[in-house]
Amino acid sequence: MKYQLFYWPTIQGRGEFVRLAMEEAGCPYEDVARAGKGGMGALMKYLESRSVARPPFAPPFLKAGRQVIGQVANILQFLGPRHELAPKDETGRIWTHELQLTVTDFVAEIHDTHHPVASGLYYEDQKKEARRRSADFLDNRLPKFLGYFERVLSRNPRGDRHMVGARLTYVDLSMFQLIAGLTYAFPRAMANSTRQYRRLLALHGRVGERPRIAAYLASPRRLAFNNQGIFRHYPELDA
Amino acid sequence: MKYQLFYWPTIQGRGEFVRLAMEEAGCPYEDVARAGKGGMGALMKYLESRSVARPPFAPPFLKAGRQVIGQVANILQFLGPRHELAPKDETGRIWTHELQLTVTDFVAEIHDTHHPVASGLYYEDQKKEARRRSADFLDNRLPKFLGYFERVLSRNPRGDRHMVGARLTYVDLSMFQLIAGLTYAFPRAMANSTRQYRRLLALHGRVGERPRIAAYLASPRRLAFNNQGIFRHYPELDA
């Protein structure tokens, strides 16, 4: 079965966490809104048509056969067991999902560093508030989240090469994306804390070298980071 | 099995979404941090002890036998099928969870109306920003989320008395809590939009009259809303 991913065509955004899982799994998928004419129309139909009984709230959503699944963590929970990106035991799966939900929380906070007032306003209209929020983010929230994920790695009874158990799961791929994005957005802050997060940075390095991920990153399928996505680089917000 | 809920003892907060599910299910549980001396210590141990291999990021978390489960939506996904608060079919369960994850997103935005700069600062230190964010919230975000949930009710092929299918699920209980909390926090804005959200308000009414929920609401187990939780009433932030 070929999956269809519905996401905005010009940003990595939240869709990237799903793309990375499908790329690592090597499963065929169509990135609908980027695939050609009519793609954006197909995406908008799911959001706006009255004939959709179970409309997603927002992209990304995944079409798998007749099923439409929204919310990143929900999509990953669906894909994980089907493509060997989740533990086999239920307890391990619940723990993996718990970590992914903490990624969701973190991503919302990362977004709000540049949009603390309103996602519908331009950055330029909330620059002052963004400076205050970003300063607190770098002082308190980033260390809280990354410190937590680093701790999870260091306490994994099966070793600090994976977040859960002894094999790669989708949450390792999400750690890769978090580190990549934060390094793009806050290069100075991240450069100052390489020791604190050495396990996470090593994980980021290993994931980026996996054959399918490396091939993906070098392909045109991987969009570049830019200042329309979640992770944005505004030097005035960095450390 | 008696569950143990770990959550801050003085607020409804995120823990309330879990409490409502356990109350409706009639399953025995201990609200650990409120249950007596040592409760807060037990909660903090899970967050801080180095001997916990899989530490939760934050309360609430639920102990079920030896398993510790964090993140509200994850806990509800665990409890739902065990206590007839989730659909029987996998597609229905994924959809219910997707809706709950949108509740999670909404709750974070509700919190940030009074804490748009930093959760670690007092409201008084971010009042100006809170006014801007709340104005946008009431104009754009609240109608976007509640309009969506109202649409989900109206499109449910099994009728508009439930969010999913023809029976109560945990997401109906979360809708109850959202409406209750928003009415406490933003009474004027909510009074102005009773027509727009008439199905959600009716659902809120029906849930509140269910025997176990009504008994819970009248009991000392239900904490009152207050200005330390997610839903806070600051008249200057209301419509």
Image (tube, coloured by chain):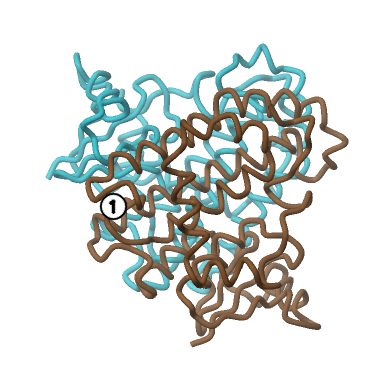
Chain colours: A brown, B cyan
Q: What is the quadrant of residue B45 in the picture?
A: top left
For the C terminus of chain B, the image quarter is top right
Residue occupying image coordinates x 24% and y 39%: B53
- Vertical comparison of B187 with B167: above or below: above
Q: Chain of mark 1?
A: B
Q: Secondary structure at mark 1?
A: helix
Q: What residue type is disc 1 on?
A: Leu
Quadrant of the image containing the N terminus of chain B: top left
* Relative height, residue B86 to residue A191 (above, below): below
Q: Residue A68 at what x, y percent from top left?
A: 54, 74
Vertical order, A130 against B90 (above or below): above
Of the pair A133 and B187, the residue shown nearer to us: A133
Q: Which residue is at a point 15% across and 44% down the rendered structure image?
A: B66
Instruction: Estimate how packed mark 1 is, as few (under 14), some (14 to 19) or many (20 or more) residues with alpha carbons within 10 Å.
Output: many
Quarter of the image for residue B41 reads top left
Q: Identify the residue position indicated by label 1 in the image.
A: B79
Q: Nearer the viewer, residue A37 or A183?
A: A183
Give the answer, above or below, for where B157 lies relative to B239.
below
Residue at position x 49%, y 71% from top? Answer: A211
Farthest left residue in view: B1
| Relative image position of residue A172 (x, y in whole percent) | 43, 55
B135 vs A87, left or right, is: right
